[in-house]
Amino acid sequence: MDKGDLVNKLLDEKKITVVMYPSGACGEYLTQLVANHTASFNNIPSYSIQWNHNLNIPSNRYECQCIIPRLHYIGQLHERENKSNWINEEYYLTNDLDLTKNFVVRDHVDRTTIKLLTPIADKVNVLHIKFSSSYAYEYFATLYYAKTAHKLKTPVNPNFIKYRIGCSDDIAQKISDRIGLEYEWVWLNDIWSLYHKIINNDTAPYEHKKSIKDSITNFAKKYKENDYLLDNLRSKFNSYYTLDIDTLPKSADRIVKQLRILYRDFDIDTAKPELSNYINRNNVVYNSMRGGWGHL
């Protein structure tokens, strides 16, 4: 089947679930948890990175591979209307696709993603991962930096930016230009922040914070903006659901119960111990990060 026809078929049959989440919210892990423990979904491969060598602390970072790559990248394509471009070639060629089952894709919340989804809002299911407590804001912001913080000397090569973010040549160059030579070094996370500024047409000055503690505090404040953006989308989608992960720092119970309500064939018995182990590893990461603030 032509790849463009495949995308149209999946959209027409409403077999795509888009998991949307802010950075640091364990989105990649939860995406693969849903896909790999729900009988009505195609499985997706994933792998973990268990150590941040730059900070010398545990990481517990997950990356997964879906049939459609990150939607914000597709939104950048000049030929994004050609749905053949939407398919992740590696996933397409190396996985047995069961077209009777659903597919999970994932992405962060940004205006490029939303712009891409809006015309097909009646053809996709959305699972919004969110949280609202002050503790959760600080917890997930800390995890975000623990898992991705990496010092980069300036100037930053646009090819490196394109490789790490998966953005277009044009946007990679814009990020590199805005970083310039103003600082001797920046956090890798700063590149992601600049990426979101550029695709959202945000011209506010870029500010690099050397203190990782200050960076975490600043990043935590942005979570409310993500919630506001997605909550305003609720009316656009026929199938829009939320997964509240406020309790994820402490327990798997409420998370798996919510998923079982959303997906009746979600296997709690296999998913819960896996998620519990993941939470325990996350807490090791969180405590290691907080313990290291004095020298980071």
Image (cartoon, helix red, strand yellow):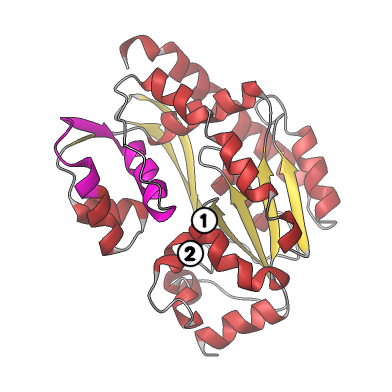
Query: Quick check: 218 left or right of 137?
Result: left
Name the image quarter holding the N terminus. Answer: bottom right
Asked whether residue 151 appears in the rendered view, the answer is: no
Of 37 and 238, the residue lying toward us: 238
Q: Residue at x 73, y 44 (%)?
A: 243
Residue 36 x/y as whole percent: 66, 56
**Which residue is most to the top?**
294
Query: Quick check: 275 left or right of 201?
Result: right
- Look at label 1 and name its amino acid: Arg
Q: Earlier in the sequence, mark 2 or mark 1?
A: 2
Q: CA distance from mark 2 to mark 1?
A: 17 Å
Q: Which residue is mark 2?
A: 69
Looking at the rendered image, the disc whose residue lies closer to the viewer, 2 or 1, is: 1
Magenta segment, which residues? 176-200
Q: Which residue is mark 1?
A: 111
- Look at label 2 and name its amino acid: Pro
Residue 230 x/y as whole percent: 64, 49
- What secondary structure is the stretch in magenta mostly built from? helix
Q: Which mark is residue 142?
A: none
Of 286 and 174, the residue lying toward us: 174
Q: Element type at marker 2?
A: loop
Residue 138 sits in quarter? top right
Count neighbours of disc 1 (C-alpha within 10 A) and say few if under 14, some if 14 to 19, many if 20 or more: some
**Which residue is most to the bottom?**
1
